[in-house]
Image (tube, grey):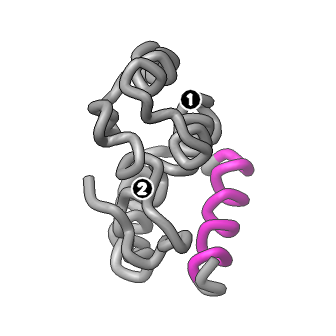
Amino acid sequence: MIEDPSADGGGPSPYEVLAPVGVTPWTSHKDMRDVSFELLARHLMTPVTQQAWDELRGVRRRLLVDLFLYDVDPAAELPLALGDIDRALAAEPAAPPQDAVRLTDELIDLIRFDV
């Protein structure tokens, strides 16, 4: 994984902050919950490390942090994804579910507006 350079939040990523205690994107959720003990044992628990740990110990917040570890170019990826969808729909004899059509339209709108 690489960190998306356009996602700079103005400081180091939580993974960078917690690297001294061995935290990586591959650290399990179970192990992440115990990181505070390692920080305390090494006298590394500071407001900065506490915040980084808080961002990574919850599943939802960690998924958001991990999202920015991928440098994705939607303009390059969209044609490939649409091609996959077109092939899957062509193999499907029935009309696509309405949810799939709506989600595809939403995805196209997001890409157009660079969200």
Quadrant in which the C terminus is drawn: bottom right
Q: Residue at x 39, y 46 (%)?
A: 15
Q: Is residue 89 left or right of residue 83?
A: right
Q: Residue at x 65, y 86 (%)?
A: 113
- Residue 49 in view: yes
Specify the quadrant of the image occupied by residue 85: bottom left
Question: Tag 1's secondary structure?
Answer: helix
Kindly give the residue lying farthest to the bottom in the view shown: 113
Near mark 1 (Cα within 10 A), the count class, few <14, some 14-19 or many ≥20, is: some
Question: Tag 2's secondary structure?
Answer: helix
Q: x%, y% of residue 19? A: 31, 42
Question: Where are the magenta residues, as a range?
Answer: 97-111
In the picture shown, does residue 86 fall above or below 44?
A: below
The residue under label 1 is which amino acid type?
Arg
Reading the image, the residue beneath label 2 is: 90
Reading the image, the residue beneath label 1 is: 57
The kind of secondary structure the magenta stretch mainly shows is helix
Q: Residue at x 46, y 45 (%)?
A: 92
Q: x%, y% of residue 29? A: 46, 21
- Residue 89 in view: no
